[in-house]
Amino acid sequence: MQRILSAQLPAHVGATVRVAGWVHRRRLLKSVAFLIIRDAAGLAQVVAADPAARAAVEQLTEETVVEVTATVVANPAAPAGVELTHPTVRPLGPPAAAPPFDLYRPALAATLPTQLDHAPVALRHPRRSAALRVAAAAVAGFRAALDARDFVEIHTPKVVASSTESGANVFALDWFGRPAYLAQSPQFYKQLMVGVFERVYEVGPVFRAEPHDTARHLAQYTSLDAELGFVGDHTDVMAVLRDTLAGMLATVADRAGAALGTLGVTVPQVPARIPAVHFTEALAIAGAPADEPDLAPAHERALGEWARREHGSEFVFVTGYPMAKRPFYTHPDPARPAYSNGFDLLFRGLELVTGGQRLHRHDDYLAALAARGEPVEPYAGYVDAFRHGMPPHGGFAIGLERLVARLVGAANVREVTAFPRDLHRLTP
């Protein structure tokens, strides 16, 4: 008899079926026992009224893996409107050790550090696994949106020879006796691949050795990167980002509807035109001094409130960041060279995406490095490619964990990360 999933049970009312999963919860009454089985699709309720079946259920421990053969009966009060009766219960392994928290409760009562210490078990909780399903759907939507626009997926090295990529701290390692580093981003490589495919994207890990200990930072996170050639300026990149984000959220709504229901989340609408403000205007809106070189988290929150109040939007672009705060490869605004053709996208008052137009002329790279007092040699393999003809181009990078955390209302990105790596955590 082929195993079926819990979500498929309503289509089998009156039939004898085989289900399998984990013992989510037992309720032992005087004359009957209720067994809740959890599988990848949800929950199934098993009713054991026969003394032998009840005795078998009584011997089980939570999280033990079992197989149940039973008859499907309609019951509006049961999960999915059906329950399983006259069961035969067979353990598929030894009795499971009790987890350090109750997985059957609506929310995990354990502290986040305790959950992270026991992540292989904590992630089984429906709310924790639901967030990961949302993340998976978001990545699928990212790929689908860009595939539909003739982007090519690429895979670039995560071990690099230079530690000077974007100003962030790096993790050093030994590469067969030579110094090497974990990549801070695929930035250089995706730009070079514009010279091959014109439009490229990558989904992969990036590593930042910055000693942040906040609810919004990880030392390793998943970056959704895109780069496109033959742009007029950064506004072309912003338009592609807007459409990509809309596609991602549509896919989340379509593929992860049950997970969103578990979390009590509604996917926000992406405006046809996301409101945009120049950095100088953003400072005024946020009540920051006019000479402030960057936006602090409090400024981002103020801008998020402004976008919601004035435009009914959960999203807002901030454009024209000062060149002093942007990487050397950022293209300056031709009309205001002190400001960049770069942008951030804020989602509910939090920086979610950084992007912009890049330099594409070899001489401009040499001038940009010289202006910052940096030697060309560490960048030689990258900069040299621009001698061979590169189109005007730009791109963006979305932090997956930040997107999902903001979308589902998690207070900490670690709540939506399977096995987070940060300042303090290398296990499990």
Image (tube, rainbow, N blue to C red):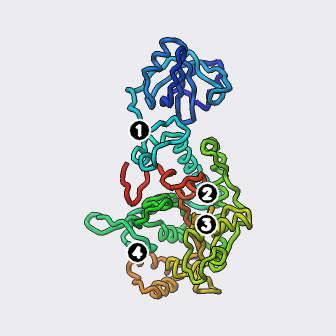
| Dot 3 and dot 1 residues touching (CB under 8 Å) | no
Residue occupying the point 64% across, 60% down: 244
Q: Could you tell me how far apart the alpha carbons at marks 4 and 2 are, in whole angstroms?
A: 31 Å
Query: How many numbered discs sit on the rendered protein?
Result: 4
x and y percent of residue 19 in the render? 53, 26
The local crowd at label 1, few if under 14, some if 14 to 19, many if 20 or more residues have their Cα within 10 Å, is: few
Q: Of label 2 and label 3, which has the lower sequence position?
A: 2
Q: Which residue is mark 3?
A: 301
**Mark 2 or 1, which is nearer the eye?**
1
Q: 281 and 344: which one is in front? A: 281
Q: Nearer the viewer, mark 4 or mark 2?
A: 4
**Lower sequence index among marks 4 and 3:** 4
Q: In the displayed structure, would residue 21 be above or below residue 207? A: above
Which residue is denoted by mark 2 in the rendering?
147
Q: Which residue is label 4 attached to? A: 164
Q: Secondary structure at mark 3?
A: helix
